[in-house]
Every structure is written in C-alpha cells, then in structure tokens.
Image (spheres, grey):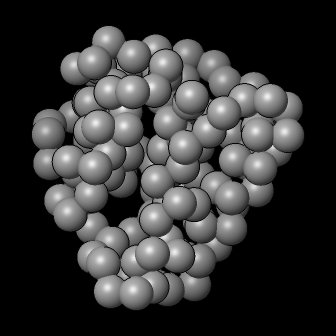
Amino acid sequence: MIYLASPYSDPDPAVKEARFEAVCRVAAALMNRGILVFSPIAHSHPIARYGTPGHWHYWKEFDRHIIGGCRGLWVLTLDGWRESVGVRAEIGLAIEFDKPTRLIDSGDGEPYPIPGLEDAVGDEP
C-alpha cells in the first residue's frame, strides 16, 4: 500500500474542500490502476466533519502507524505541499522508516523521486 500525502489545512474552507476533491480523484485513479492507496485526507476528511481536529498533531500517531505499514509515501504536489506542516512531517516519518518517497502530480499520475528530499522536510514541526 502507498501512503498518499497531500496538503489539506487552510483558513479558507473552499481550499480544504478543493484539496480533498483533488486527492480523492488521484487516489481513485491510482486504485483503478491496481495500486493500493491510503490517503489520510480522503479517508479522514469525512470523519473530521464530526468533530475531530484537522491539524497534524492530532493525527500524528495515527499516521505514524499507517506510514510504518506502507511500502512507500507519495506526495501529491498540490499548491502548498512544500509549506504543509503535515506533508513535511509525513516525509520525515517516511525517511525515519526508510520508505521510498516520491512526488506525484495530478496529471499523468506517475511518481518520480524527490530531489533534495531533506530540503523538502525542513525541521520537525
């Protein structure tokens, strides 16, 4: 299974909803190609509507377990992915678990290595 990271949080609810829709489209396309995918946004956004916090610190331990069990982490390069506290932390966890990490865009759906991966991570949030 691939862990599909993507930015989510934003003060504008319309941006959060657009990010949710985008990652769902990509996850569905990958799953239709036979790639098993876990997207924390696609799987948790509907749950968050019932009162769970949407910030990284709430989901950190949950995502740590999921990333640890996945064979790799792919980052959907929506606007804001480099600045996302959650995405940077998820990349950091993938490095910690020695999981291959790739970028993926919403176009062709083909993952590619992240050059300068450590630069994308920065400091642990």
Query: Which residue does the image show at 76% across and 56% down from the upper left?
Result: 25
Note whether 52 is above or below 69 in the view shown: below
Q: Nearer the viewer, residue 52 or 100?
A: 52
Residue 118 image offset from top left, x and y in percent = 29, 21
Q: Nearer the viewer, residue 78 or 32?
A: 32
Residue 26 shows in the view: yes
Q: Is residue 64 left or right of residue 46?
A: left
Query: Which residue does the image show at 59% across and 52% down from the upper left?
Result: 78
Note whether 8 is above or below 93 in the view shown: below
Query: Which residue does the image show at 40% across and 77% down from the upper left?
Result: 48
| Rendering quarter of residue 120 | top left
Note whether 11 is above or below 71 in the view shown: below
Residue 75 image offset from top left, x and y in percent = 52, 37
| Extreme-left residue of the structure | 124
Question: Which quadrant holds the N terminus?
Answer: top right
Residue 88 image offset from top left, x and y in percent = 31, 41
Q: Nearer the viewer, residue 125 or 37?
A: 37
